[in-house]
Image: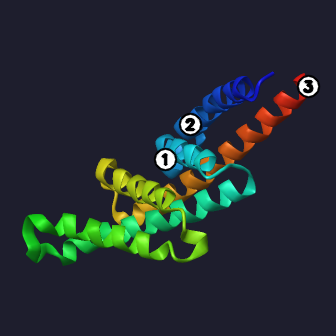
Amino acid sequence: MSLLIALTISIGLLAVVATWLFLGPLAAFQMQIWQAFVAWASFFHNGGKQDGFVKTAVCMSFGAAVGMASVMLIGYLGGLGALAAPVAVGIGAAVIVLAAHIPLLSTIPSSVYGFACVAGLILLGKDMTPTAAIVPTILSIIVGAAFGWVSEMIGGVLTKKAD
């Protein structure tokens, strides 16, 4: 079968499993399926395989840490009024781009995905502080990247069986 059909089957079935896990057993840890899906997509964006997993896990986790720090910085910039949040986000974005000089952190989009994931959880989570949001975000990222890797492997097996 073609790789596209194989990935359709693999990703579709694993999406069922992932959603069940995140809405069931992993919900107690405040892990988020939407963050895992972003990481899953980032895995493929980064070329898949071990390299895609590492780039996703490292860059998205780094971006999440920068996002957490940026949200925390808003309070310290309170004297700027309505500009506090935009300035904090701008500083975070600059840190992400500057860090891309380090090869392990060179995938800027994945770092931005991580920033957005933690910021989204903080903004959407009931009583979710920045420090409380970072652990479930990073765990969701790692699990999502792992689902990407597994879906790629299953897709490869299904493709080879048809040959």
Q: Quadrant of residue 22?
A: top right
Which element is circle 2 on? loop
At horizontal 66% and vertical 61% (from top left) the residue drawn is: 54
Image position, residue 96 (x, y; %): 42, 70
Q: Residues within 10 Å of mark 1 (few under 14, many from 20)?
A: many
Residue type at numbered disc 1: Gln
Which label number is shown at residue 163? Answer: 3
Q: Quadrant of residue 84?
A: bottom left
Task: Answer with mark 2 or mark 1, whichever residue precedes in sequence.
Answer: 2
Q: CA distance from mark 2 to mark 3?
A: 38 Å
Image position, residue 110 (x, y; %): 51, 57
Which element is circle 3 on? loop
Q: Quadrant of residue 25?
A: top right
Q: Is residue 52 left or right of residue 69?
A: right
Q: Is residue 96 left or right of residue 159?
A: left
At horizontal 69% and vertical 27% (from top left) the residue drawn is: 4
Closer to the observer: label 3 or label 1?
A: 3
Q: Residues within 10 Å of mark 3 (few under 14, many from 20)?
A: few
Task: Answer with mark 2 or mark 3, whichever residue precedes in sequence.
Answer: 2
Q: CA distance from mark 2 to mark 1?
A: 16 Å
Image position, residue 14 (x, y; %): 67, 32
Q: CA distance from mark 3 to mark 1?
A: 35 Å
- Answer whether labels 3 and 1 touch (C-beta < 8 Å): no
Task: Assign the C terminus to one quadrant of the image.
Answer: top right
In the picture of the structure, the residue carrying the numbered disc 2 is 24
Image position, residue 36 (x, y; %): 54, 45
Which element is circle 1 on? helix
Q: Is residue 137 above or below residue 151?
A: below
Residue type at numbered disc 3: Asp
In the picture of the structure, the residue carrying the numbered disc 1 is 35
Viewer-side residue, 30 vs 72 = 72
